[in-house]
Image (cartoon, rainbow, N blue to C red):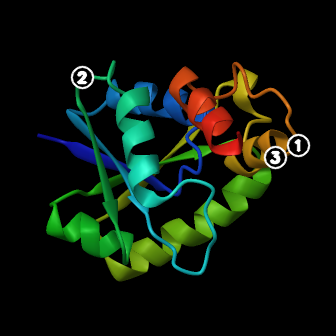
């Protein structure tokens, strides 16, 4: 069974993320979406909320598992016998960042392969940080995030 992992903070998960998950899940037997913990970062949603929102947003994807971790992704992958990491790319800036990350992971574990997937054109401008900023200024996030995320944002800001 070929498993792959998608990692990120997903604060919040966007429709661009969901698009990548759907496409990635179509090419592997099992897709694990892992929310990472970065203790230096201040989050809009806490780890439990992000995991719950991911579970709700991806329940239509049958071969997906949602998890979280604190540490090196290469250690998580080794512990779970995963050799493929899938990363979504929106822009050339994403590519430049992700290539460095992929090379570092490869340095830590040469058996890991990184697959880059291009974000669907309709989501090129959608980022979690952009969603947080839009929400904080009371802008509409409708159509940019799953409905459960839109509701959670509205609830948190009310």
Of labels 3 and 2, earlier in sequence is 2
Residue 15 visible:
no
Residue 139 position in % (x across, y down): 86, 32
Q: Name the residue: 33% across, 30% down.
A: 25
SS state under label 3: helix
Residue 11 visible? The answer is yes
**Quadrant the C terminus occupies:** top right
Asked where in the image residue 99 lies, by quadrant, the reply is bottom right
The vertical placement of 24 against 143, above or below, is: below
Mark 2, residue position: 62
Q: CA distance from mark 3 to mark 2?
A: 33 Å
7 and 139: which is toward the camera: 139
Q: Is 70 situated left or right of 13 in this image?
A: left
Residue 105 lies, in percent from the top left, at 42, 73
Q: Is residue 55 left or right of residue 124?
A: left
Q: Quadrant of residue 143?
A: top right
**Residue at screen point 33% across, 72% down:** 74
Per the image, the residue denoted by label 1 is 137
User: Height in image: 22 above or below 51?
Assistant: above
- Give the labeled residue for mark 3: 136
Secondary structure type for disc 1: loop
Around disc 2, counting alpha carbons within 10 Å, would you say few (fewer than 14), some (14 to 19), or many (20 or more)? few
Tell whether 23 sits left or right of 158: left
Residue at the image position 20 percent from the left and 32 percent from the top: 29
Label 1, residues with CA under 10 Å away: few <14, some 14-19, many ≥20: few
Q: Residue at x 88, y 43 (%)?
A: 137
Query: In the rendered view of the protein, which quadrant contains the N terminus?
Result: top left
């Amino acid at each position: 069974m070929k498993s792959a992992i998608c990692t990120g903070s997903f604060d919040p998960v966007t429709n661009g993320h969901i698009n990548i998950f759907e496409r990635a899940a179509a090419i592997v037997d099992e897709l694990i979406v892992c929310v990472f913990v970065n203790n230096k970062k201040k989050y809009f949603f806490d780890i439990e909320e992000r995991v719950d929102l991911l579970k709700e947003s991806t329940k239509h994807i049958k071969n997906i598992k949602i998890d979280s971790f604190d540490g090196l992704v290469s250690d998580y992958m080794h512990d779970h016998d995963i050799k493929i990491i899938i990363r979504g790319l929106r822009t050339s800036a994403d590519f430049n960042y992700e290539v460095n990350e992929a090379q570092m992971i490869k340095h830590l574990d040469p058996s890991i392969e990184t697959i880059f997937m291009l974000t669907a054109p309709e989501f090129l401008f959608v980022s979690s940080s952009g969603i947080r900023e839009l929400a904080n200024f009371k802008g509409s996030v409708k159509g940019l995030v799953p409905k459960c995320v839109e509701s959670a944002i509205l609830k948190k800001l009310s």
